């Protein structure tokens, strides 16, 4: 599970990087500002990155643009070292995803870049570096991330609340359809007559558009906080107050209730948080180590 969470995290980091786009585009005479392990970074590339910064509202300036380009040259080199290649199809898909996230068409994305003086190859090169670095993160860095299960157990135990220490078998009674006020009236009438799960279906037959659904076993930590708190105050045979949901008006009835502390779901949230923090820190350290070993020559 931890690996899945970290993979999602790496994907989220990639999409964040994708929105900071830009390297090279051949044009007029260019001069080299920096060479990174033999790879030149030109004044044109830096100017393109600055223009992209302007479109993003990034105030990094020429120095920030140059530093990002140096990092990208190092990231591309490391990806190449471990055998990572990035296809044009991957870049095309990434461009499409950016346009979707911005809720604009790809043509509009291209036009926006052009209006800002940013060439399309600048975007494509930037995406190539981001995708390559994401692959490095998955293959090299993620397997190194370690999360202490004992620490997770201790933190989860400290976070669990009294109302979260119950295990239930539940039925949902739902009055289907729009018109929440009318449905709520029927739901309250049903609730006043409710005498337990065994007669829940028979009771529903006397109401219009009422359905009884077997929810099955749920631990309190799987339920919304407000629902878990209300259920904690009810006994077996109790039923919650009506709540408006997307499909109508819903109530939950308790068929069984036992004391059972389950930290699984709390631990899952904690694992995601710790995994994100640990992954982010190790990615930063890994890049810093690569940069310390790189041959960077400023002209």
Image (tube, rainbow, N blue to C red):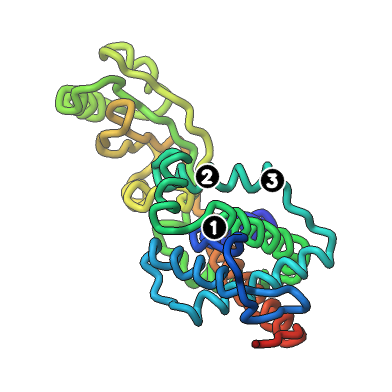
Secondary-structure class at tag 2: helix
Q: Residues within 10 Å of mark 2 (few under 14, many from 20)?
A: some
On the image, numbered disc 3 is attached to which residue? Answer: 88
Secondary-structure class at tag 1: helix
User: At 15% from the left edge and 27% from the top edge, which residue is drawn?
Assistant: 181
**Residue 43's spot in the image, x, y percent?**
56, 75
Instruction: Kindly report which numbered mark, 3 or 2, lies closer to the viewer in this rendering.
Output: 3
Q: Residues within 10 Å of mark 3 (few under 14, many from 20)?
A: few
User: At 25% from the left edge and 38% from the top edge, which residue is drawn?
Assistant: 241
User: At 35% from the left edge and 46% from the top edge, which residue is drawn?
Assistant: 227
**Residue 270's spot in the image, x, y percent?**
54, 65
Is there a contact, CB below 8 Å, between mark 2 and mark 1?
Answer: yes
Residue farthest along the front direction in this orientation: 29
Res. 18 mark: 1
On the image, numbered disc 2 is attached to which residue? Answer: 97
Say which of 57 and 17 sits in front: 57
Say which of 54 and 262 sits in front: 54
Q: CA distance from mark 2 to mark 1?
A: 10 Å
In the picture, measured across the screen, residue 139 lies left or right of residue 218, that is right
The numbered mark, 2 or 1, whose residue comes first in the sequence reads 1
In the picture, measured across the screen, residue 190 lies left or right of residue 167, that is left
The numbered mark, 1 or 3, whose residue comes first in the sequence reads 1
Above or below for 55 versus 282? above
**Which quadrant would the C terminus be assigned to in this image?**
bottom right
């Amino acid at each position: 599970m931890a690996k899945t969470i970290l993979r999602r995290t790496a994907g989220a980091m990639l999409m964040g990087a994708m929105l900071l786009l830009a390297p090279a585009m051949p044009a007029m005479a260019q001069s080299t500002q920096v060479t990174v392990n033999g790879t030149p970074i030109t004044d044109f590339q830096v100017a393109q990155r600055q223009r992209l910064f302007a479109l993003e509202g990034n105030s990094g300036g020429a120095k920030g643009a140059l530093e990002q380009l140096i990092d990208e040259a190092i990231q591309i080199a490391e990806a190449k070292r471990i055998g990572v290649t990035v296809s044009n199809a991957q870049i095309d898909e990434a461009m499409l995803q950016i346009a979707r996230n911005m809720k604009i068409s790809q043509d509009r994305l291209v036009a926006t870049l052009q209006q800002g003086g940013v060439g399309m190859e600048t975007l494509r090169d930037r995406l190539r570096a981001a995708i390559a670095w994401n692959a490095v993160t998955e293959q090299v860095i993620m397997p190194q991330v370690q999360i202490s299960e004992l620490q997770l157990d201790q933190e989860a135990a400290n976070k669990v609340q009294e109302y979260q220490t119950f295990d239930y078998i539940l039925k949902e009674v739902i009055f289907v359809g729009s018109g929440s006020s009318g449905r709520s009236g029927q739901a309250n009438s049903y609730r006043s007559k409710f005498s337990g799960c065994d007669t829940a279906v028979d009771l529903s037959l006397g109401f219009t558009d009422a359905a009884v659904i077997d929810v099955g076993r749920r631990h309190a930590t799987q339920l919304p906080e407000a629902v878990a708190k209300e259920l904690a105050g009810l006994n077996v045979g109790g039923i919650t107050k009506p709540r408006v949901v997307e499909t109508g008006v819903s109530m939950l009835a308790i068929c069984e209730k036992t004391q059972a502390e389950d930290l699984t779901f709390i631990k899952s949230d904690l694992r995601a948080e710790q995994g994100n923090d640990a992954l982010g820190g190790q990615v930063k350290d890994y890049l810093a180590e690569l940069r310390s070993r790189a041959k960077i020559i400023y002209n």
